[in-house]
Structure formats: C-alpha cells, structure tokens
Amino acid sequence: MSMKDSFQKAMGWMKEFSKTNPEQMKSFQNMMEAIEKEEGAALDKKTKELIAVALSIARDCEWCIACHVKFALEAGATEEEILEAAWVAVLMGGGPALMHAGLVLEALKDLK
C-alpha cells in the first residue's frame, strides 16, 4: 500500500467513525482543534506537525506517518525539516524507529 493509500484509508476511517460514533468523533475533533490552533499558542502548526511526525514514528503508526507528513508539508515544512524530525525519533527509538522512518521517505515521495 502506498503512503497516499494509507492517508486516504485513515481519512476514510475518520469519516466512517463520524457516522457510526458522532459524539466520540466530535469530542476527538474538538480536542484536535484545541491542540492544533495557532492563536495564542506557543508553537506554530508546522512545529506541532513535525512533533507529530516524530511521535508517529515512535508509535509505529503507518497511517499517522502518512497523515502527519502530509499535514507538515501543508503547514510549510520542508523535506529537510520532516527528515530531521524523523531522525530525532530514530535517536530516541533506535532500529525499529529507523525502519518506520523509511515510511517518511515513502510519504514524501507519495504525498508531495
């Protein structure tokens, strides 16, 4: 599966959950909006997405990697910044994180 497919799959699941479990998804979306907002926040969206890329690697989540690489690009992150965030995750997570960081390379190719 390509990282573009992983992204679309994750978005599809969120859409389906919005139908089957609207209250839970609304609560989750409210939390995401509160955390991701920039107004009055100490971190901008790009920085938050770079952190999310690193955490997605650390948590071994292919779908999260696809989503947060795409969102980081949309927030203005460069390929170099995204890869540096990935390497921070590798520093903290070792070999398994390095293997998941490979998915970042695929996402950068698929989602640009």
Image (spheres, rainbow, N blue to C red):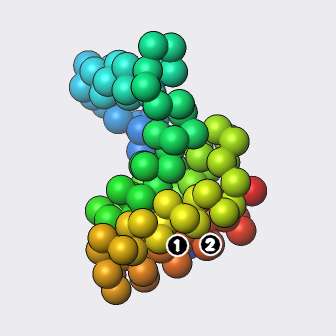
**Above or below, comparing residue 31 to residue 103 in the picture:** above
To which residue does mark 1 refer? 103
Residue at image coords 58%, 66% = 83
**Quadrant of res 24:** top left
Q: Amino acid at mark 1?
A: Leu
In x, y percent, where is residue 17? 35, 35
State if disc 1 and disc 2 touch (CB < 8 Å).
yes
Residue at image coords 48%, 66% = 86
In x, y percent, where is residue 59? 29, 62
Residue at image coords 37%, 26% = 35
**Quadrant of res 106:** bottom right
Evaluate whether residue 11 shows in this view.
Answer: no
Q: In this view of the protein, which residue sits in the foreground, 26 or 44?
A: 44
Q: Give the spatial CA distance, label 2 vs label 1.
A: 5 Å
- Asked which secondary structure carries label 1, the reply is helix
Q: Amino acid at mark 2?
A: Glu
Left or right, residue 49 beside residue 108: left
